[in-house]
Image (cartoon, grey):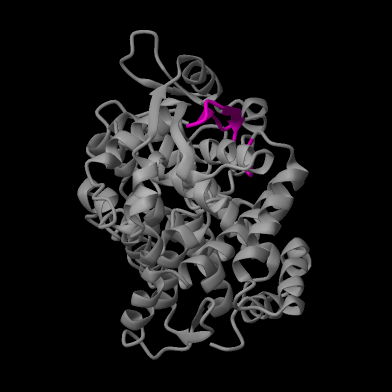
Amino acid sequence: MSAAGLTRQVAEWVSGVKYEDLPRRVVEEAKNQLLSVIAAVHAGHFSDFGRGLRRTVKDWSSGKDATIIPLGERTSLHTAIFANSALSSALEYGDHLFAAHTGHSAVVSAIALGEKVGLSGKQLIVAQVVANEIEGRLGAALLAAGDSMEALPACHLVGSAVVAARAFELDADATHAALGLALMQPMRALEPTFFGSDGRPVVAASSAPLGVQAAQLAASGWACDVDVLGHPRGLLASLAAKPVDDAFSALGSAWLTETLCYKIYPVHAGIATIVDCVLDIGRQHSIDPKKVRAVQVAASPLAVEVDERARGYLAGPATAAGTIAYSIGYNVAAAIADKELSARQLTRDRINDEALWELAGKVQVARDEIFAERAEAAWLAKRSGDGSRWLVDLDPLHVSQFRMSAGARVRIELEDGRSFEAEEEVAEGAAGRAYDDRRKAVEDKFRRETRYSLRKERMEKAVDLVLHLERASAANVRELVRLVCSERG
């Protein structure tokens, strides 16, 4: 797909996709994503961040368009999207696919609009998948920006605009306008706030409602017929000196939804394999955290780079909860001490534990070149031979066989001289693991994170409804929202 008229071509594809165009495997991934994001919303609801959010949004609107999950409180469409998006991203617990984190907009906006407009299960799936595809490609197109944070607001703006365009059944012209209006928003993610505070969820939560508003304006007749994506002074050119102009190719044949990875722990994607290793050692051996002499971690660049970036914002027990997801030392220490890594390790009480930080100080991290080579080989984007630009591989076969390679090797050394070691290349729940294992990981995550607010009967009804979502009517979709909300409020 050429850069000339890129926004028009994207709009035409978005408005023309039918449920029957989606491969069965893509539909099944969308169901997994839906369960995973709802689980992340529940986890965020019970976090320290979630309590503050509930107090804040309570006074924003008295509308009855959509529901804040799992509170069950009806509010305006935009407030519900903001709240649910913020909760889903509060703990770095949301899913991700190649080059983008889409669930905080693609799933959250689809659920809210499903309530307001009355989408059937098939319509919800199409809106969600189409948003995944466009957000993933936009993230890939902005790789040359040099910082993935640059792409985050734009992806969520476009993703929600696409979901709303499908929900409101906009034609190609109006969808084109929705994309253009969405990208008029002057948003940018700033590193200090993103890595050093609890402000990270604002990126998705503020962007997603604005994308929906853009589609609503387009539905009301607002026009925007410029090529906001491909114009020489448009989004891609402004954020990336040499944008990846082939990133929007293969729409409808290569499905980035197939590259979805589901977070089993509330950590950065690169750190998940490290946690897998620590927990695997803990299951096989009894480790007394007080007797650990050192922990050696060899990891992929994805983990090492984000850990180095986060270190400037670590302050021991005073560290912001939002920073923790990017720290290898803290998460390794917590996994050793607690033999789990969940939202519980992100509470203020747990972060305040001096002993945990003492153990974190014993964690030594090094980049492993073999893991680096494997990660580079598996990634769907490569630098050109002269290093001047990025090339994206959207061959349908390669996309469908994508492996989220972020290898790690962990050795825990004890004071008595014993040591234990484990190695993993692809994290539990990530693309590259067997499909059945990933489905089970998502269902386990959903049940684990909703057990505090849902009775088992409601929980299992919700799982069953999602797993058969293509049969759901608009009334069934609204019933799903009711099922995943706490009866206690």
Q: Nearer the viewer, residue 260 or 362?
A: 362
Residue at 44% over, 65% down: 85
Residue at 43% over, 35% down: 140
x, y percent for residue 166: 54, 62
In this rendering, position of residue 115 left or right of residue 355: right
Q: Nearer the viewer, residue 320 or 7?
A: 320
In this rendering, position of residue 426 left or right of residue 82: right
The chief SS type of the magenta part is strand
Vertical placement of 47 versus 388: above or below? Answer: below
The answer to whether residue 112 is seen in the rendering is yes
Instruction: Name the residue at the top extreme.
Output: 386
- The magenta segment is 403-431
Residue at 56% over, 60% down: 37
x, y percent for residue 150: 29, 43
Vertical placement of 395 versus 149: above or below? Answer: above
The answer to whether residue 170 is seen in the rendering is no
Q: Nearer the viewer, residue 419 or 486?
A: 419
x, y percent for residue 485: 59, 80
Residue 420 is covered by the magenta coloring? yes
